[in-house]
Amino acid sequence: MKILFLGTGAADFPSERCEGFRRTSSALIDDTILIDPGPWVLDAIEEYGVDASKIKYVLATHLHSDHFNRDTLNYLLDKGAKYVELSPKETITLDSYTILGLPSNHTVPCTHFIIENEGKRMFYGLDGAWLMYEAVDAIWKKGVDLAVFDGTIGFVEGDWRVFEHNSLSMVLEMKKSLKDSVKHYVVSHLAYTLHPEHKIVEAEMKKQGVTVAYDGLTIEF
């Protein structure tokens, strides 16, 4: 499997490019499944040379405007993609992919995913605080090759968003419990106002065995 991070930022990034700019979070799996048709997806598709006509399915974690944009979705639908809705605890099959929806701890209904194809599995869980038990149990039972965690808050302490998003300290605590159930840990959805520049976050998390995603990063596993 392959994941291309089309965007790795949270909703507080300016609407225009700035130093350290990140698009709002979105990812493309195997050039086939797009997660979160946000407002910067078409810009990313153009920059990274993605053939939009190859995108067959579009999933949305939730309907917050940084993750879901109707114009983006309509563009992808016009290119031949199908929008697929998935609720927590529901499992669907899309071609050779099996996708399990999982509940999340967020202010609006938000679905996390375990996506499986040809013996490889990945967890994608952006927007959410501590993992819900159903998600943890599924990861323990299935094991995943790669897990993408929300890392909105950075190492800031006492921020109110801790009730709907992860700090990096929370991610590291969950990593201690999940242990080898996850082979490769990744964080995305980094807030503009809560993180230092990328190279600082990257160096700190690398010590802990966690990859910090950036726009355009491709990981094959």
Image: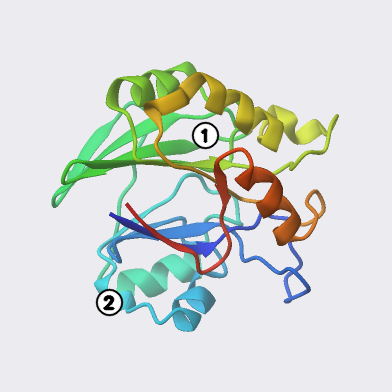
Of label 1 and label 2, which has the lower sequence position?
Answer: 2
Query: CA separation, marks 1 and 2?
Result: 29 Å
Rendered location of residue 119, percent (x, y): 18, 41
Q: Residue furthest right?
A: 158
Q: Callout 2: helix, strand or loop? A: helix
The answer to whether residue 104 is above or below residue 43 is above
Tally of numbered discs = 2
Query: Quadrant where the N terminus lies?
Result: bottom left
Splitting the image into 4 quarters, where does residue 90 fall?
top left
Residue nearest the viewer, comparing 221 with 41:
221
**Residue at horizontal 71%, vertical 60%?**
199
Of discs 1 and 2, which sits in the foreground?
2
Image position of 192 with respect to 183: above or below: below
> As rendered, which of 1 and 47 lies closer to the eye?
1
Residue 190 lies left or right of residue 36; in this view the side is right
User: Closer to the camera, 49 or 66?
Assistant: 49
Number of other residues with Cα within 10 Å of mark 1, as a class: few under 14, some 14 to 19, many 20 or more: some
Quickly name the residue at label 2: 53
**Residue occupying image coordinates x 56% and y 70%:** 40
Hey, which residue is sitting farthest front in the picture? 207
Say if residue 105 shows up in the picture. yes
Q: Mark 1 — residue? A: 109
- Amino acid bearing label 2: Ser
Q: Position of residue 5 (x, y in %)?
A: 48, 61
Q: Position of residue 207 (x, y in %)?
A: 64, 42
10 Å crowding of disc 2: few (<14), some (14-19), many (20+): some
Residue type for callout 1 = Pro
Residue 95's x, y, as percent? 14, 52
